[in-house]
Amino acid sequence: MKHFITFALIFSSALSFAQYEEAQPFAESIDRQDLKELLYVYASDFFQGRETGTLGQKRAVTFLKEFYQTRGIAAAKGTEDYFQKMELTIKGEAVSTENVVAIIEGSTMPEEYVVISSHLDHEGIKKGEIYNGADDDGSGSVALLEIAEAFQKAAEAGKGPQRSVIFLHVSGEEKGLLGSKYYTDNPLYPLANTIANFNIDMVGRTDPKRDSDNRNYIYLIGSDRLSTELHEISEAANKATTNIELDYTFNAEDDPNRFYFRSDHYNFAKNNIPVIFYFNGTHADYHKPSDTVEKIEFDLLEERARLVFYTAWEVANRKDRIVVDKKK
């Protein structure tokens, strides 16, 4: 019996790995050097801190658009050349801004959608200092670009996702999750057919509470709030691939930080769409001009981006859509 159990465990593990073997070469195209090159541009002074509605933010959305264009990744329907334009009210003033939305259409279930998101904006310029937001959320922005490119490489190799995958860069996060709220209030694709949202917000640093021997982790928030199945898929994908420590500290319903309510996934969760929020935790440079690129840990950023890719790959390609079995 002991030998049978051992064999069963080995066989089960082999099946789990085989499930992601097809995705592996595309996941491994998500590369720390590419991430570094992108982020040194995106979190540079040229973008002036990317405050919503400013010249710097307009430069940022142009950068994102041009990335998708040069990789042959299509603009989402209903956009104006990748831009979902918005008129927001911020502190009583009208502000013109835009989300950036691209899509790879599914091969067999194109009318079901997986959304991967990050926020493109940051704090801008305060008292003459530029807040470049390398981690918040430059790290998530460039991770999303690399994930999109990995899916596009799969599609070009004839192994594209069965469901459509939407790459959503939202504006106005720092002003109150406004861009994601606008998207969910004015969806480009039906929310009823949106399977899940994977939200990437601050994934390039280490929580100072963790020591140098315990840095290969990511905080996951929300994975079990609406769907037991999504949580199980997330755990299995990680175990079979990156094997990062998944830390649920901030997922507790009594978490005093209330991070579950503080990033863009929440506007999807409010609409009964299962979510996972990927987050490295805060640090001394959070919302300060010292959140700069040279402090980003690109080996961690690479692994975390690959984890999001593998998890999204599974959800986009599995036969059945994930089940929502809990109340929002």
Image: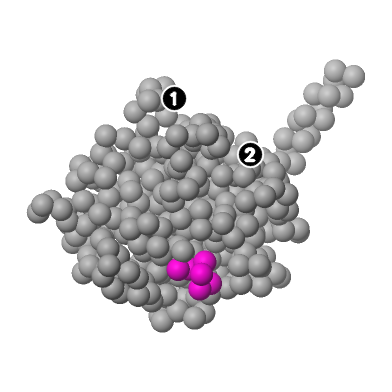
Q: Is any part of residue 160 visible from this angle?
A: no
The residue that label 2 is drawn on is: 235
- Tell me which residue sits at (76%, 59%) in the image: 319
**Position in image of residue 6 (x %, y %):** 80, 24
Q: Quadrant of residue 51?
A: bottom left
Residue range in magenta is 182-187
Residue 9 located left or right of residue 170: right
The residue that label 1 is drawn on is: 214
- Tell me which residue sits at (9%, 54%) in the image: 128
Q: Is any part of residue 185 visible from this angle?
A: yes
Relative depth, front residue between 312 and 26? 312
Q: Quadrant of residue 196?
A: bottom right
Q: How is the image coloured?
A: one colour
**Position in image of residue 212 (x %, y %):** 37, 24
**Position in image of residue 28 (x %, y %):** 50, 49
- Tell me which residue sits at (62%, 51%) in the image: 328
